[in-house]
Image: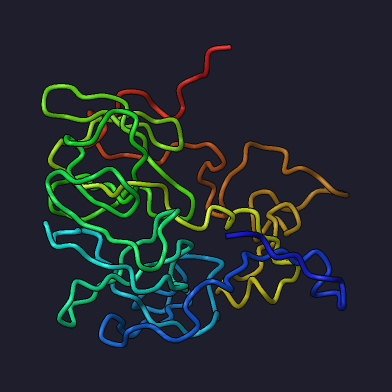
Amino acid sequence: MALKHYNPTSPARRGLVLVDKSSLWKGGPIKALTEGKKKTGGRNNKGHVTSRGIAGGHKQRYRLIDFKRRNWDIEGTVERIEYDPNRTAFIALISYGEGDVTYIIAPQRLAVGDKVIAGKKTDVKPGNAMELGQMPVGTIVHNVEMKPGKGGQIARSAGTYVQVVGRDRGMVIVRLNSGEQRYIHANCMATVGAVSNPDNANQTLAKAGRSRWLGRRPLTRGVAKNPVDHPHGGGEGRTSGGRHPVTPWGKPTKGARTRSNKSTDKMIIRSRHAKKKR
């Protein structure tokens, strides 16, 4: 996919850069593979805002994606590549014959008419899924399971991928985009290739309204507020806050570590925060 640049025929078009979606399916999704999706506006069941910066946005239907890839040893054909409003990656409609269809995350270099298959061990080609323990070292994969049978959790966003870098006693060592290296059980499934739409990060929305269509509300900086509203607020003239960055509730932010999962920390070999050797 290439980037699409627009002529400055209006202020909203000046600087607009979007991903060219002309090669994607023009129609709607398979209705049986979708379900309704309700907007929360960032509110919980009591009406309190628990996720700030969320409201509005275009109405969406959720596409049911096959993250598990458990149709083993049944060859499927790529019917079409579609846009999915719920994620940055594109999705592919796979037909297994006799009306059996499913959506998967589309990898790069997957085209309409290509054949894909999932199994314990398959050919190393984009769209095929197999167990991590059967993949050659150096393979680029996505949609990686963390627990066998749970479904892919790692590397599902546009342009992301994970690289298999080694094996050790029934475990596979993988390197994530963040630089983290970790163990994953060899029986976990993964799909070959990097996720589609790598140019998603290079888009320029060019106007606030386009962000609102995506459900993103404006953010007021803490230093622009009054002391009653934010810990960074107040001061005579413009200030930089005068303290280490905190949230509106005084909790450390911008670099403060919030990750706390002792059950999986032991699987990390090299932290994403490890200092790089110069």
Q: Examine the image and state in which quarter residue 23 appears.
A: bottom right
Answer with left or right where residue 136 lies relative to residue 121.
right
9 displayed left or right of 195? right
For the C terminus, which image quadrant?
top right
* Residue 208, quarter of picture: bottom right
Q: Image height check: is 230 above or below 103?
A: above
Q: Position of residue 170 (x, y in %)?
A: 11, 28
Q: Residue furthest top?
A: 278
Count of numbered tags = 0
Quarter of the figure that contains the N terminus: bottom right
Scheme by which the image is coloured: rainbow
Residue 238 % position (x, y): 85, 48
Where is residue 176 drawn, in percent x and y? 39, 36
On the rendered structure, is 250 left or right of 105?
A: right
Give me the residue at 66% from left, 63% from top. Answer: 219
Q: Which residue lies most toward the front here?
A: 113
Q: Nearer the viewer, residue 223 or 131?
A: 131
Q: Residue at x 18, y 62 (%)?
A: 75
Nearer the observer, 52 or 233: 52
Q: Which x, y percent locates residue 11?
A: 86, 74
* Picture residue at 62% right of the left edge, 41% below the top: 245
Decide which of 158, 258 is in the foreground and name it. Answer: 158
